Image (cartoon, helix red, strand yellow):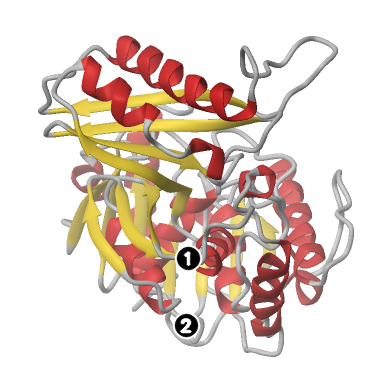
Amino acid sequence: MKIMNNIKTAVALCAVGAEKVVSNELRKMGIKVDASLYGKVRFYAGIKELYQALIGLRAADRVLLETASFKAADFDVLFEGTNNTPWEQFVPEGMGLKVVKVRTNRSLLKAETSIQAIVHKAAAQRLCNQYKMNRLPESGVNQPVKTAEVRVYIEKDIVSLLLDLSGDPLFKRGYRSEGGAAPLRETTAASLLLLSGWKRKFPIYDPFCGSGTILIEAAMYAWDMAPGLGRDFAIQDLSIADNDTEKLVREEFRAKIDFSRLVRIAGSDEDLRSVSIASSNAARLRDIAEGRALQHGIRSLNSEETGIDFKVLPMMQAKSPFSDPGFLVTNPPYGKRLGSQPAAEEIYKEMANLASRFSGWKLAVITDHSGFESFFGKKADSCREISSGAIPSFFFEYDVF
């Protein structure tokens, strides 16, 4: 049953600090944005816009559909509001349902475990009544059952019931079979690129390329390749799924890919294995872009085939391979995620030597060390916090290196 002829409210979850990027992405697709909030962006969507957001957003971690919004200051009203939601229009018969997350802020309802239990009970009761069953299906050892995942956000007593359309987080693009040590999320890497102001006409270099995430996201952006072309989404199992619309949106995105553009993307790392993984990940991206079956394991392709020039070099030997200045965008590989803080601070000091080999370049650095500037030896032109997990990160930008 298709019910998405009308426009509904949807939510794109993202890293705190990346809301503006996601809002701009949505507007560029022609999608109307409602509000930019803390770690999420509300927007209006029909079925086509939902597929556009799922397949095309670079900086969002999830896309959720709001099934209901109502005021509830006590548990009885919460139950009634959830039970009055037409879950049968979204969740097909034979599918389970699970409340996976609850967030409450400045509201009378605070007990997250109790909220989770009541929302599940009310939604399950509605579905069981509609489908004439005693209980919803549950996965067993020998009987896997697909499950609709619900998130509950309560802000100033306003309840928002959100159905996950993504499935796996959107940072799982499909090109990375191995990430190396402490890899940067793909969506965070895309956010850095868009926040830095990098455009495809400028060279870009990463002297700590690791598994290549920043540079691969840059190549995807330069080719105008939608990041979700190589994967499926949870919406496909819901009643609102529309295969014809999904196919149309995928074809529209794939038609935009252009490998003929001048792309100057390069990077290096001192670890041979990391560079091998980066090259293999870049090769898988090209597979996705050209609609080929993915090949796993380590692969060896040259820069002409992948669009990215990877080299095995320590940071102290990295130098610009291009004639004009561009953007250094990087995630130094030490700190809380990996290694020790003193080791990280020594790396930051050594990074100052990059200036002589990248004169005139813009530098953009993400790190979990708030004191980066003092060790690097120069105050950043701007700094913002970007957090997508338990450890906050800081994005330092230097307009001219």
Residue 264 against residue 340 in the figure, above or below: below
Q: Name the residue under label 1.
A: 46
Q: Give the position of the C terminus as an image quadrant.
A: bottom left
Q: Where is residue 57 in the image (x, y as percent from the top left)?
A: 49, 62
Mark 2 and mark 1: Cα distance apart in space: 36 Å
In this view of the protein, which residue sits in the foreground, 218 or 85? Answer: 85
Q: Which mark is residue 218?
A: none
Q: Which amino acid does label 2 sit on?
A: Phe
Q: What's the residue at 18%, 19% (across, down)?
A: 109
Residue 49 against residue 233 in the figure, above or below: below
Q: Position of residue 367 (x, y in %)?
A: 35, 43
Q: Is mark 1 on a helix, strand or loop?
A: loop
For residue 391, say whether it is visible.
no
Q: In which quarter of the image is residue 332?
A: top left
Q: Report the side of 143 relative to 348 (left or right).
A: right
Check contact, mark 2 vs mark 1: CB within 8 A.
no
In this view of the protein, which residue sits in the foreground, 242 or 314? Answer: 242
Q: Is mark 2 on a helix, strand or loop?
A: loop
Q: Position of residue 399 (x, y in %)?
A: 25, 72
For residue 349, say whether it is visible.
yes
In this view of the protein, which residue sits in the foreground, 347 or 145? Answer: 145
Q: What's the residue at 59%, 72% (across, down)?
A: 265
Q: Mark 2 points at which residue?
A: 202
Number of marks in picture: 2
Q: Which amino acid does label 1 sit on?
A: Gly
Q: What's the residue at 40%, 37% (across, down)?
A: 85
Q: Where is residue 384 in the image (x, y as percent from the top left)?
A: 21, 52
Q: Callout 1 environment at 10 Å: few (<14), some (14 to 19), or many (20+)?
A: some
